């Protein structure tokens, strides 16, 4: 099998060499590109607060009840270690929600979270040579049940959530300091209205004031970076989302921080890829949460699709890869959760590889010379180049299963590990 993969790879490299593509250089680049893998796929966005809050309010809904979800931090870590063994590449990252802290079996209110609740995660990250990112958790809580948090008309509610986010930023800075790599702190809030509101401006002004308060304390970019995640609509916020893409983009440009583009948070007919070149001239960095929406923001498992390929083509063509942070964001409990993680992670890296293997300079030259027929013809021919042989070789050199072999590993893991959790 190894010889066959190497033979096919050598044949494929010659095809790409005809277009001036150095496949070895591309793979060296791909090897080092980090991907932040989200923790909440492993337990359906449950977290480890005691008692666990019910998933109510804020448009968070995980549908399905497949066997074997993680019930403890140790089980979640075990599952992620399995995922890492099946995803090629280095520099893996693990993206936590703050509700996944180690609270010692005690109930800790969210405005009392502290770095000590994440020391276990930091030690685990060191042992497994991964980095950590963090998200504030402003959903699944009694103080979010009316649909408003940082933009609530209640001063007490706003102050509670402001303190929570401030503490999460402190935790992020501690994580970044301990791991020697900046922790990206992402903020998404569920605030919005199910039906048509009258005072949109009032809520957005309150959100701006809350953000100003939260971001008043500055941290070095060497330990943590802030990012704001907008949304088109969600469950319970179909008519109005306070933290829309336009609101956060404006705020981010004014305050020189990142925005998070979730690929499932836009209208199905919008091109998320097109937003890359529209945003990057104005922001130093960008965070991506890669998801797959079907008809609505449903956070389906990421697959290699035209939309995903276009997204990475735009990143590469814009020469923006070094300024863009890649992460996953989906949760599907209707299938094997570890399998869902691996599908999404491998699909993301496949789409990135596909984009890296394109002869950008030739395509740009055609375009600048008005050779539009040649440009379109080459783009079509690229679709049938032996990209799969390059991917298989990448998996082989990373000592992860090639082709469909990883499916059997997930099946064995389900029998030997997941079924034991029932």
Image (cartoon, rainbow, N blue to C red):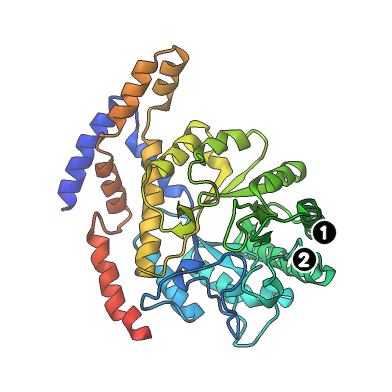
Q: Residue at x 34, y 30 (%)?
A: 21
Q: Residue at x 34, y 61 (%)?
A: 86
Quadrant in the picture for residue 371: top left
Percent x, y of residue 56: 59, 73
2 or 1: tag closer to the N-terminus: 2
Q: Residue at x 57, y 76 (%)?
A: 120
Disc 2 to disc 1: CB gap under 8 Å: yes
Viewer-side residue, 49 vs 266: 266
Q: Which residue is mark 2?
A: 162
Q: CA distance from mark 2 to mark 1?
A: 8 Å
Residue 257 visible in this rendered orientation of the protein:
no
Mark 2 Cα within 10 Å, few/some/many (few <14, many 20+)? many
On residue 213, the disc is 1
The image shows residue 26, relative to residue 97, as above or below, that is above
Percent x, y of residue 146: 70, 70
Residue 7 visible in this rendered orientation of the protein:
yes
Viewer-side residue, 219 vs 103: 103
The image shows residue 387, relative to residue 289, as above or below, that is above
The image shows residue 148, relative to residue 43, as above or below, that is above
| Element type at mark 1 | helix
Mark 1 Cα within 10 Å, few/some/many (few <14, many 20+)? some
Percent x, y of residue 320: 55, 37
């Amino acid at each position: 099998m190894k010889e066959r993969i190497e033979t096919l790879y050598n044949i494929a490299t010659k095809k790409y060499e005809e277009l001036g593509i150095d496949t070895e250089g591309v793979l060296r680049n791909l090897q080092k590109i980090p991907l932040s893998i989200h923790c909440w796929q492993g337990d359906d966005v449950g977290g480890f607060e005691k008692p666990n809050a019910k998933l109510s309010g804020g448009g968070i809904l995980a549908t399905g009840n497949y066997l074997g979800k993680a019930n403890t931090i140790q089980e979640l870590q075990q599952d992620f270690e399995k995922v890492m063994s099946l995803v090629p590449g280095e520099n893996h990252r693990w993206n936590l929600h703050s509700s996944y802290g180690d609270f010692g079996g005690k109930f800790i209110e969210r405005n009392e979270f502290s770095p000590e609740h994440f020391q276990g995660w930091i030690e685990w990250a060191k042992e497994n040579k991964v980095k950590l990112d963090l998200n504030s958790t402003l959903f699944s809580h009694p103080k979010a049940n009316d649909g408003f948090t940082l933009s609530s008309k209640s001063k007490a509610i706003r102050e509670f959530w402001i303190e929570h986010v401030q503490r999460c930023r402190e935790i992020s800075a501690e994580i970044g300091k301990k791991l020697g790599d900046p922790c990206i702190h992402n903020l998404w809030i569920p605030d919005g209205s199910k039906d048509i509101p009258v005072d949109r401006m009032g809520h957005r002004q309150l959100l701006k004031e809350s953000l100003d308060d939260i971001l008043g304390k500055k941290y070095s970019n060497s330990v943590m970076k802030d990012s704001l995640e907008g949304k088109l609509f969600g469950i319970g916020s179909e008519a109005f989302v306070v933290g829309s893409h336009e609101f956060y983009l404006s705020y981010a440009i004014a305050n020189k921080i990142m925005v998070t583009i979730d690929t499932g948070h836009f209208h199905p007919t919008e091109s998320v890829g097109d937003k890359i070149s529209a945003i990057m001239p104005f922001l130093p960095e960008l965070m991506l949460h890669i998801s797959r929406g079907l008809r609505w923001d449903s956070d389906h498992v990421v697959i290699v699709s035209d939309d995903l390929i276009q997204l990475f083509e735009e990143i590469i063509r814009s020469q923006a890869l070094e300024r863009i942070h890649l992460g996953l964001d989906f949760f599907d409990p209707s299938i094997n959760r570890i399998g869902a993680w691996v599908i999404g992670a491998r699909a993301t890296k496949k789409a990135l590889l596909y984009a890296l293997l394109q002869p950008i300079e030739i395509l740009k030259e055609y375009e600048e010379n008005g050779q539009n027929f040649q440009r379109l013809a080459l783009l079509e021919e690229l679709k049938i180049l032996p990209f799969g042989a390059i991917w298989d070789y990448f998996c082989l050199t990373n000592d992860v299963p090639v082709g469909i072999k990883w499916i059997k590993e997930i099946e064995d893991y389900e029998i030997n590990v997941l079924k034991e959790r029932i």
